Amino acid sequence: LGSVISKQEQQEVVNVAHRGASGHAPENTMSAFHKGVEMKADYIEIDVQMTKDGELVVIHDTTVDRTTNGTGDVGDLTFEEIRELDAGSWFGEGYAGEKVPTFEEILDTFRGKVGILIELKAPELYPGIEEKVADALTERNMERPNNDKIIIQSFNHESMKISKELLPSIPHGVLAGMSWADVTEEQLAEFATYADYFNPNMNIVTHELVSNVHEAGMKIFAYTSRTQEQADRLFQLNVDGIVSDFPEHVYYHPVKNK
Ligand code: G3P
Ligand code: CA
């Protein structure tokens, strides 16, 4: 009974379903995103890239090889070619026929139902992708403050500067891999000139990092938790959000230490 937690005792940490609930359904497919919503995630995380003919599509790798039955670079394939691919069978036969979603399809399906954490994946490969993303959001009146739960992030920090200029009311995040383990307070202050989030690999998260990010006026969502132990550790470190393949890991925590 000691492990039973009342609603009031549950912590407040933002639950982000990484590429959708990708522990349960094929990543970056409608199934994975619907599953994330069903599992009560606060946000779905999506990876956005661009086809040869300029369509924004949702897929993680810069090739289609791992997650579809096709081969080749996303940027060398037309939208029609990508749309013919099966993005589900690799995960399980029950998912045969899943398509690579479009960015606009995700906005239209999920706006108002769940937050959307939009990652611009390898934007250096797709000149002009920031404008296309901004246009898709603006056409839907989703570029305004507090309109919808929308955050844009990237490992490419120059791209985030461009995007923040285009969409000043939308929160932006800088993603930080292992090489940022020793990020300084000065570097965080510079990020904070255009970013609202510093979102690191979970392996570099320490109490000190969390407090430095907060001191700099940003929030911190850590990625990518795949076990209950990893989610528990991040929770204890007081992060603002946990990006996880398993949304169920993020809600079963003891009371957060204040
Ligand atoms: O949300 C952050 C996380 O998605 C970054 O890593 O490789 O899964 O896109 P990756
Ligand atoms: Ca991602």
Image (cartoon, rainbow, N blue to C red):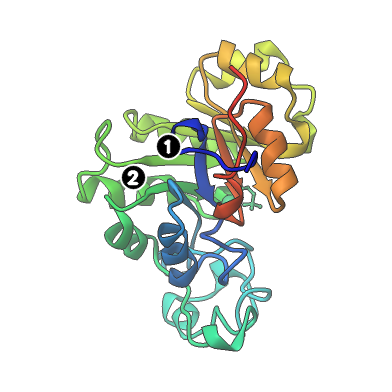
Tag 1 residue? 163
In the rendered image, is residue 201 in sight? Answer: no
Q: Name the residue nearer the viewer: 175 or 235.
A: 235
On screen, residue 49 above or below 204: below
Mark 1 element type: helix
Tag 2 residue? 134
Q: Disc 1 or 2, which lies upstream in sequence?
A: 2
Say which residue appears at 48% left-offset and 63% top-offset.
58
Q: Name the residue nearer the viewer: 13 or 169.
A: 13
On screen, residue 44 above or below 187: below
- Tag 2: amino acid: Ala
- Disc 2, ligand 2: is the CB inside 8 Å? no
On screen, residue 17 above or below 104: above
Which quarter of the rendering shows the C terminus?
A: top right
Q: Position of residue 221 (x, y in %)?
A: 57, 35
Relative to 161, 198 lies left or right: right
Say which residue appears at 38% left-offset and 29% top-offset.
165
Mark 2 element type: helix
- Crowding at dot 2, Cα within 10 Å, few <14 / some 14-19 / many 20+, comes out as some
Which quarter of the rendering shows the N terminus?
A: top right
Q: Position of residue 49 (x, y in %)?
A: 51, 59
Q: Name the residue nearer the viewer: 247 or 45.
A: 247
Disc on res. 147: none
Say which residue appears at 66% left-offset and 11% top-offset.
186
Q: Position of residue 256 (x, y in %)?
A: 59, 26
Q: Position of residue 244 (x, y in %)?
A: 61, 50
- Tag 1: amino acid: Ser
Labels 1 & 2 near each other (Cβ < 8 A): yes
Relative to 3, 25 lies left or right: left
Say which residue appears at 48% left-offset and 73% top-offset.
100
